[in-house]
Image: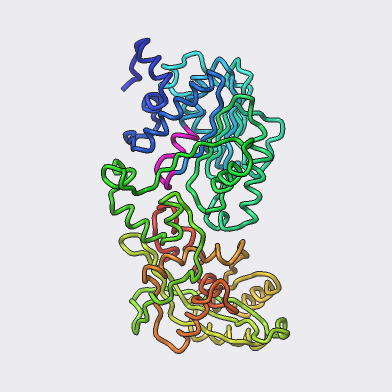
Amino acid sequence: MGIPTLTAVQQERDRRCFRRFKKRVWWMPQPLLEGIHSAAVGDRLTRAVEDFKQGRSTFLCILEPFRHGKSDDISRAFPAFALGALREYQPDIIMASYSAELSETFSRKVKQIVASPAYSTLYPDITIDPLRNAINQWAISKSAGEISAVGVRGSITGKGGHIIIGDDFFKSREEAESERFRDKTWEGLCNDILTRRAPVSIVIICATPWHEDDQFGRIRKKMAEDPDFPQFEFMRFPAESEDYPTGYLFPERFEPQWYRSQRATLGRYASAGLLDCDPQAREGNIFKTENVEIIDVLPTGLRFRRGWDVASTEKQRAKDDPDYTVGVKATCTFDAQGALHVWVADAKFLQAEAPERNRVILQTQAEDGPGVEIRIESVAGYKDTYTTIKNLLRGKAIVRKVGAVIDKVSKLSFLEAPFESGHVHLLRGPWNDKFLAHFRAFPKGVHDDACDGLYAAIDDFSKHISLGFDRQAIGF
């Protein structure tokens, strides 16, 4: 079917109303679905444009659960809408995200919308300048304004913004849990992004909240402390509420079971931010070890890895209770609801110097057999251990290294949900009590070596836990 011809009245309505505009230029093959949140956001964006024309700035924070279309509204459709609705102002637009690559992905989609036949029915005089047509910086023909796609922690020196959009400043929960990343993100937002705004501007920060001290938490704190700080309006849309007709935010797209399974998969701590859009301070006793299931027989067909967290009492002999070297034999599966299950078949504990430690690792590999991949955490002063073991086992077993991460709490956060849901299963053995003791005391216990050993065995599963990605056993 071709693009229908619009009457002058229809054209003007679609130009002035963001929701009508998005429906007109909708770019996906499946029908456009509108929920409570997208209707409210759409109306607010229309008003932001009208306020701009009247010389009034907008500062807006939009908090939505993941996969509910916030980027479709804010980072794809709205820049294209603003380029047309505010064409006489020749606006500069800055699009920022946790990486320049993600911002450029949004920028590419905005360009495709602007170049589409549907857009041309609304704005036939708007075309992309062929001489200013890079993905990260482009412009409309005969316009002084430019569209820039940047990373929030990068540099945007020399660029201005009538419209500034910040979409997802953290790549993962691991980044959001890191105070260092939160500090860098906040500095980038305040020192680089917000300083670029024009005297009259539209500033929109949209994201799924990850942490109580993320950009939303800090904006609220700064607003309370300093009345001269931009006073942002907050639009928060939790996944579930008694105020919704069905109890759920987006039943047009997701069945109630989807929300329930996501909550079960994420656990209470992550669900507070990612679903309820109200992140809470982390409690103590992160891992609910009382819910762990001790079993006598493992399911058939599981393929295990042995993850080693290495230590050496020679390097730590000043300590009264040196760290353990721990080798955890484990794997993961996903059930029909997408929830992660962790299976632990064995854990070796020893406090030994390097020669004895390496001997035990080799002996354990012989017991496990060649089908059990070895994974060694390669950090700090133990990077040579990976190389040594790899050389000693060449031709006998696959040996892979697990690299350093930001901090232990963030790297292990993906295990909270299975511990909470009773989806951690241990084969009964004399090592059970010590293994659970390390998790019970985490993160303030004297020893957390079993935690590191389990992470080394199954770290790649963490990448498939959040944000509703397809779940599948990795490499199995």
Question: Residue 335: horizontal and vertical position, in percent?
Answer: 33, 64
Question: Residue 92: horizontal and vertical position, in percent?
Answer: 61, 25
Residue 398: in sight, yes or no? no
Left or right, residue 288 beside residue 450: left
Left or right, residue 351 beside residue 294: right
Up-down: is 111 above or below 366? above
| Image quadrant in which you'd find residue 264 | bottom left
Residue 69: in sight, yes or no? yes
Question: Residue 88: horizontal and vertical position, in percent?
Answer: 55, 15
Up-down: is 127 above or below 465? above
Residue at the (58%, 38%) spot, across then down: 96
| Image quadrant in which you'd find residue 222 | top right
Span highlighted in magenta in the image: 64-76
Residue most toward the top?
8
300 inside magenta stretch: no
Question: Residue 404: horizontal and vertical position, in percent?
Answer: 63, 65
Residue at the (49%, 65%) spot, across then down: 283
Q: In the picture, which quadrant includes the C terminus?
A: bottom left
Residue at the (55%, 44%) spot, across then down: 220
